[in-house]
Image: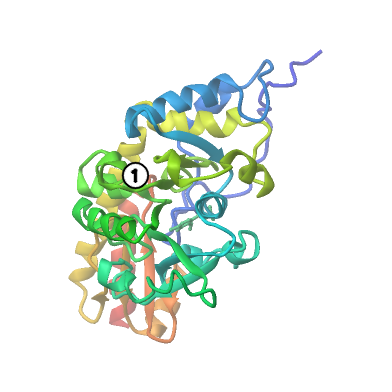
Amino acid sequence: MADPTTVRTDARRHHDPQVRGFASDNYAGTHPEILAAIALANGGHQIAYGEDDYTEHLQRVMHSHFGPTAEVFPVFNGTGANVVSLQAMTDRWGAVICAESAHINVDEGGAPERVGGLKLLTVPTPDGKLTPELIDRQAYGWDDEHRAMPQVVSITQNTELGTVYTPDEIRAICDHAHGHGMKVHLDGARIANAAASLDVPMRTFTNTVGVDVLSFGGTKNGAIFGEAVVVLNPDAVRAMKHLRKLSMQLASKMRFVSVQLEALLAGDLWLRNARHANAMAQRLAEGVRAVDGVEILHPVQANAVFARLPHEVSERLQKRFRFYFWDEAAGDVRWMCSFDTTEDDVDAFVLALKEEMAK
Ligand SMILES: Cc1ncc(COP(=O)(O)O)c(C=O)c1O
């Protein structure tokens, strides 16, 4: 009988693997080293729901990045990591302070509210970053039974606008939040890009400066799917284990999530991928700066470039390369680079931009 785990070689390909755009780091495929790691984890039987050898090893790998108290809970996706983390950090009457532009507020379909039962208290920010002063716009009324109680500050590193907090900025947020009895959650869907940008270990801007719980991102950095809640301060959470299952984020064949994160983190793949994506964004920004009539909107500190250009130019350019409007009325667009973006992709895009601007 044929081995049921053997890969079929006659599988048909339905897309052109040479086509890449600037729409999202989620458009990219999977890094070959991660695919190889998945194949290695295949075959035989392993205990389901997280008691497998790969999840156990991932735990040790996480310790090497975040210290011996870190506890990892692999999940399917970033929304799940955020919703599980924030539920575990709040009481039923609690609320989460976040930037108005935070993924949890604008891009999770209301899951924090509807699945997590959480109240979000949002603050407008110029660059996606919270500060102690901005937090204070919502940090009040702990004794007021009429107001959801601010219990957590959630920040995103790097931010949804491609900016990166310094470790000192995060320390100031943590000190401020803790001073008010609140905890700090960090949405690290692109934590590797932030570490590459700052050129520091990930712990330098997480547990070292007081972050309590982290949503660790693997998907945008080369995994097929796979993120994790990393509890950095065990006193900040309750019932993680139960909430992960309750929130439909407990993978039965968890070894295949864990092995992807292990493949990223056991060596330097996470950093290589992130450095490359960031370097491509720098190359793109440099090219774009030389084009009259195109304005770069935020400091380019990770793998995203935000720009403002005439609407009709963007529409024509979108027929040649995929990317999204960020604020269509204002003419703002977002261009994302990923681990597999090439220099040629960037140069071809900049050339196309020049051609469309000149028409
Ligand atoms: C900042 C941020 N957080 C979390 C996520 C995770 O989202 P998903 O549930 O699609 O994995 C994303 C993905 O776009 C993101 O940009």
Q: Does the residue labelled 1 lie within 8 Å of ligand 1?
A: no
Kindly identify which residue carries mark 1.
192
- As drawn, the residue found furthest toward the right would be 1
Q: Is residue 217 left or right of residue 274?
A: right
Name the spot of residue 135 as percent of width and height, x first. Answer: 33, 69
User: Please, what secondary structure does the residue beneath circle 1 have?
Assistant: helix
Name the spot of residue 223 as percent of width and height, x first. Answer: 49, 40
Residue 126 visible:
yes
| Other residues around mark 1 within 10 Å, as few (<14) / some (14–19) / many (≥20) | many
Q: In which quarter of the image is residue 266?
A: top left
Q: Which residue is drawn at 28% across and 60% down?
A: 176
Q: Which residue is drawn at 20% across and 79% down?
A: 292
Position of residue 323 relative to residue 242, above or below, is below
Q: Which amino acid does label 1 sit on?
A: Ala
- For the C terminus, the image quarter is bottom left
Position of residue 87 relative to residue 69, above or below, is below
Name the spot of residue 142 as percent of width and height, x first. Answer: 44, 69
- As drawn, the residue found furthest toward the bottom would be 329
- For the N terminus, the image quarter is top right
Position of residue 85 relative to residue 322, above or below, is above
Name the spot of residue 92 as percent of width and height, x first. Answer: 59, 60
Q: In this view, does 329 lie to the left or right of 79?
A: left
Q: Which residue is drawn at 53% across and 74% down?
A: 145
Q: Which colour scheme is used?
A: rainbow
